[in-house]
Structures are given as C-alpha cells and as structure tokens.
Amino acid sequence: MIRLVICDDQEVVCQGLKAILSTADNLDVVGIANNGLDALDLVRKQYPDVVLMDLKMPVMNGIHATKEIKEEFPKIKVLVLTTYDGDAWLFDAIRNGADGYLLKDTAREALIRAIEDIHAGQTPLDSKVAGKLFRQLSKQALPGDTTLGQDLTRREKEILKLISHGMANAEIATRLFLSEGTVRNYVSGILDKLDVEDRTQAAVLALRFGLVE
C-alpha cells in the first residue's frame, strides 16, 4: 500500500484528488494539507511514501516545503502536481528535490501510474515540461570525459538522443523506420547500460554528461 499526503491550497481540490485516488486499491491517502507548513507537519506525523505537492500556496509555498521535506526525509518522494509550467517553477522544484513534475490536467489513470512509478524509483515528468527541463540541462552539459555510456552502440546512442529530445517510442520508431517493439527493446538495453529506472533519468544523464549532442 502506498501512503499519500496531498498538499493543495484549495480544499475542494484536495478532496477531489482524495476521492479519485481512493478508488485505487494500492493507494491510501493518510492526510491533507492546505499549505506547505501544514504539509511538513503532516509528513512528520504520518511519514507517507509520496507527497503530492502543489507549488503556489500560502504560509509556505510548495518549493520551500519540498526542500524541507527532502532534507529531513530524503526517502519520501515528492511529486509536484500543479497548474504552473513556467521555467522558474519547474527548475526551482527540481533543484529543491522534487522527484517528479505533473500538471493538474493529468488524467486519473496517468496520475495513479505516476504515483506508482515514483514510489518505485522512477521520475514521472509531464511531456509539456520535459522539453524545457532537457533544454536547460543541455546548456549545463558536463565534459564528456566519463566512462558512463561507453558501451552504448551507435544505434543506442541515436535512440538516446531522440529520447533526450522528448520523443516517445512510437515517434522514434517512425523516425528510424523501426518497429515500436524494436525501439522498446533498444530503450530497455539503454536503461540497463546506464543503470537508470526510466527514460527521463536516461535523458538527464545523457545531456548532463555529454552522451548526446
């Protein structure tokens, strides 16, 4: 069972999310907070597995609350769920420890899957903001003097580059004239070689360590 805390300044939003998430057999909402300070207090009392965190809130905003939670409880996952897709919000949330970033128009099934994924160590990231994050990271790419990814084949590097551009498997398959199943196999191999859980983590590593141009 994945124990959740929901933090949003709108009580109606919290109750709506609780009703939606309570329909999943493996999710248990153990508390609701309407500002970041209350969220921090609730986390200390309940020690949940995942916190759903809005960003713009009174008393203590979601950025500061995320930072405090991750510093005090690094194993607790913080999944940002917000209406804000601006660069400043996104980058501040990631810099302060957010483990994932979704927008509030995320469908119910996708939200539940994202909570399961983040609990399993993956990094859910809304496609609407993924490009912004990858472009920012590419500007900060480190010198490619690491052994990371040295065993990737030419085709795997080609697919990794397309992943870092935010392309889905179906789009990569079309671009490279491959079947979608073949692309999935390549992606699985790339994740194994980079020792990461998902394609977002692979893209971040690729851009930060200069594995792709």
Image (cartoon, rainbow, N blue to C red):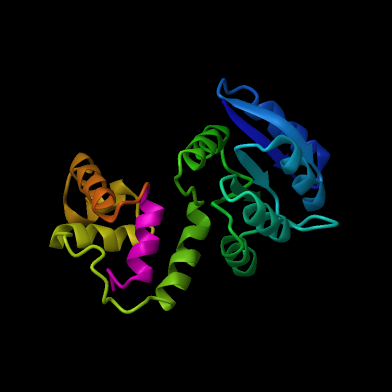
Q: Is residue 174 left or right of residue 17?
A: left
Look at the image and tell me in which quarter the C terminus lies. Answer: bottom left
Q: Nearer the viewer, residue 37 or 9?
A: 37
The picture places residue 36, in percent across and down from the top left corner, at 77, 52
The picture places residue 21, in percent across and down from the top left corner, at 63, 29
The picture places residue 126, in percent across and down from the top left corner, at 51, 51
Q: Is residue 2 left or right of residue 173?
A: right
Q: Nearer the viewer, residue 76 or 184?
A: 76
Q: Is residue 83 visible?
A: no
Q: Is residue 142 above or below residue 33?
A: below
Q: Residue at x 76, y 58 (%)?
A: 61
Q: Which residues are drawn in magenta?
A: 198-213
The picture places residue 97, in percent across and down from the top left corner, at 58, 58
Q: Residue at x 29, y 46 (%)?
A: 170
Q: Quadrant of residue 167?
A: bottom left
Q: Nearer the viewer, residue 195 or 111?
A: 195
Q: Is residue 208 magenta?
A: yes
Q: Residue at x 38, y 70 (%)?
A: 208
Q: Is residue 129 magenta?
A: no
Q: Is residue 139 above or below residue 110?
A: below
Q: Quadrant of residue 50?
A: top right
Identify the residue at the far right of this view: 59
Q: Main secondary structure of the magenta part?
A: helix
Q: Nearer the viewer, residue 122 or 165?
A: 122
Q: Is residue 61 left or right of residue 213?
A: right
Q: Is residue 94 visible?
A: yes
Look at the image and tell me in which quarter the N terminus lies. Answer: top right
